[in-house]
Amino acid sequence: MKQLTILAIAAVSWAQSPVFEVAAVRPANPETKGTNVRRDPVGGFTASNVNLRTLIVLAYSIQEYQLSGAPGWIASERYDVIAKAPADAKKSDTWPMLRALLAERFHLAVHRETKEAAVYELVVAKNGLKIQEAKRAPGETDDWCRQGSGHLQCYLIRMDYFAMTLSGIMRRQVLDRTGTLARFDLTLDWAPDDRKKVDMEAVNSRPSIFTALQEQLGLKLEAAKGPVEMVVVDRVEKSSAN
């Protein structure tokens, strides 16, 4: 009886998980240049010329260094994805629905592990924040960051999501320790480590990202030890056109 109860609870939980109403996953045109990813305010998702590694990272809200156990082809095989959300969906449903789509189309199965590792803690610098809480109404491009070499533009972003974005830049887990739940519009410019891809003259005068965070935003990165969650791929298969 106990086993049947557990199975029944699992079945209900699965049935209640949001899924896309309609979704298409197709191999991308090999001649396509660049990658474009977008989720709309009602939970829909589109991506062009995107690899599966990126899709997994997005679906599980992790950085690339947190993904392990995956075969090399997930970074080389590229896909176009068009997924429509059901009428009652909301923006926060996008990633759970993407996880369900990856499980269906790529037979993706993962498990999570947590290990102690070197991290950064994002804290407010001693002179306080230099950015003001955003007061405007949210729009379609909000709760998101756009990144270039040594440049970051974020729209109506919370500090925990900003810390997640910094994790990708620093290639190390960044934990939000600012203690604020406010949302901010912010811009950050720094001298990137890889300067071969940018105009040297334009970035030579920029500070390091550590200094830029303090001078431009009133934030600071402090080295620490902390838990790092890993997503380990147990199974994944290539998807055919559908």
Image (cartoon, rainbow, N blue to C red):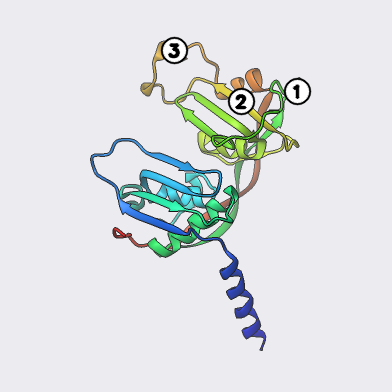
Q: Residue at x 23, y 39 (%)?
A: 31
Between 64 and 44, the one lying in front of the other is 44
Reply above or below: 8 against 233.
Answer: below
Label 2 Cα neighbours within 10 Å, binned few <14 / some 14-19 / many ≥20: many
Which quadrant of the structure image shows residue 1? Answer: bottom right
Which badge, 2 or 1, comes first in the chain's sequence? 1
Q: CA distance from mark 3 to mark 1?
A: 28 Å
Amino acid at circle 3:
Ala
Reply above or below: 117 against 18.
Answer: above
As drawn, the label of residue 233 is none
Q: Secondary structure at mark 3?
A: helix
Residue corresponding to mark 1: 128
Which badge, 3 or 1, comes first in the chain's sequence? 1
Amino acid at circle 2:
Leu
Between 4 and 109, the one lying in front of the other is 4
The spot of residue 23 in percent (x, y) is 41, 57
Count of residue discs: 3
As drawn, the label of residue 202 is 3
- Give the left or right position of residue 185, taking residue 150 as reference: right
Q: Residue furthest bottom?
A: 1
Q: Residue at x 66, y 36 (%)?
A: 158
Residue corresponding to mark 2: 186
Label 3 Cα neighbours within 10 Å, binned few <14 / some 14-19 / many ≥20: few
Between 157 and 130, the one lying in front of the other is 157
Q: CA distance from mark 2 to mark 3?
A: 20 Å
The spot of residue 37 in percent (x, y) is 43, 41
